[in-house]
Image (cartoon, grey):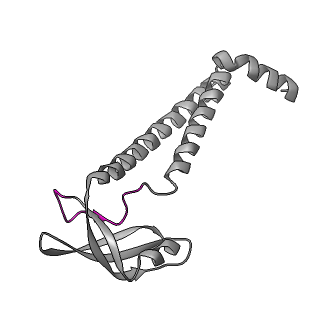
Amino acid sequence: MLSEAEKARLRWYLMAFGAVVCWLLMGYSAWKHLDRRDWHSTVGEVVAREDCGRNCIARLTYLYTVGGRTRLGRFSETPSHRSQELGGGRVTVYYDPERPERSTLSRDLPGNWGWGLAFLAFCTLYEWAQFRVATGAGLGPLEPLRQRVWRRLGL
């Protein structure tokens, strides 16, 4: 049977593993999007728009020409209500100059990326604090503040 400290330590290790995986996925996503800053741009035209409702992701299909060759691109990172701004007309297409078949309509990070990062940082700090308290290590310089708060709450 595991003691409370061992349970807390095990839970923290599992949470830490999950946090590391999330941090790596978010880092890869950021790197992938930041890589697009160096891509060239051209004018393209949206030829199809598939909306699935107001609160989901719309899929846009567009044509663009690079080096005299017309290419087909698909974009599915835009919320459906924003796709109407892009749909049915000319759009700016960003493409990889080394591999022109790779293209996008936006070089920005997805809008909810910042909220995901903030939530992940909060969860990581919360679990770290829980681990430190459960194992008796305390919170270092924050320990007096924690003890004062816990006394006031009667814990």
Residue 99 lies, in percent from the top left, at 17, 59
How many labels, in total?
A: 0
Quadrant position of the N terminus in the picture: top right
Residue 41 occupies quadrant: bottom left
51 within the magenta span: no
In the rendered image, is residue 18 in sight? yes
Residue 70 lies, in percent from the top left, at 17, 76
In the rendered image, is residue 136 in sight? no
Q: Is residue 123 above or below residue 116?
A: above
Quadrant position of the C terminus in the picture: top right
> Front-most of 42 and 134?
42
Residue at screen point 86% across, 29% down: 153
Taken as a whole, is the magenta stretch helix, strand or loop? Answer: loop
Q: Is residue 40 above or below residue 127?
A: below
Residue at screen point 35% across, 83% down: 48
107 within the magenta span: yes
- Of all residues shown, which one is farthest toward the left? 68
- In-image side of 95 versus 1 (left or right): left
- In-image side of 86 versus 97 (left or right): right
Residue 152 occupies quadrant: top right
Residue 141 lies, in percent from the top left, at 66, 16
Magenta span covers which residues?
A: 97-108
> Front-most of 15 and 47?
47
Residue at screen point 40% across, 81% down: 49
Residue 30 lies, in percent from the top left, at 39, 47
> Front-most of 19 and 96?
96
Residue at screen point 52% across, 31% down: 13
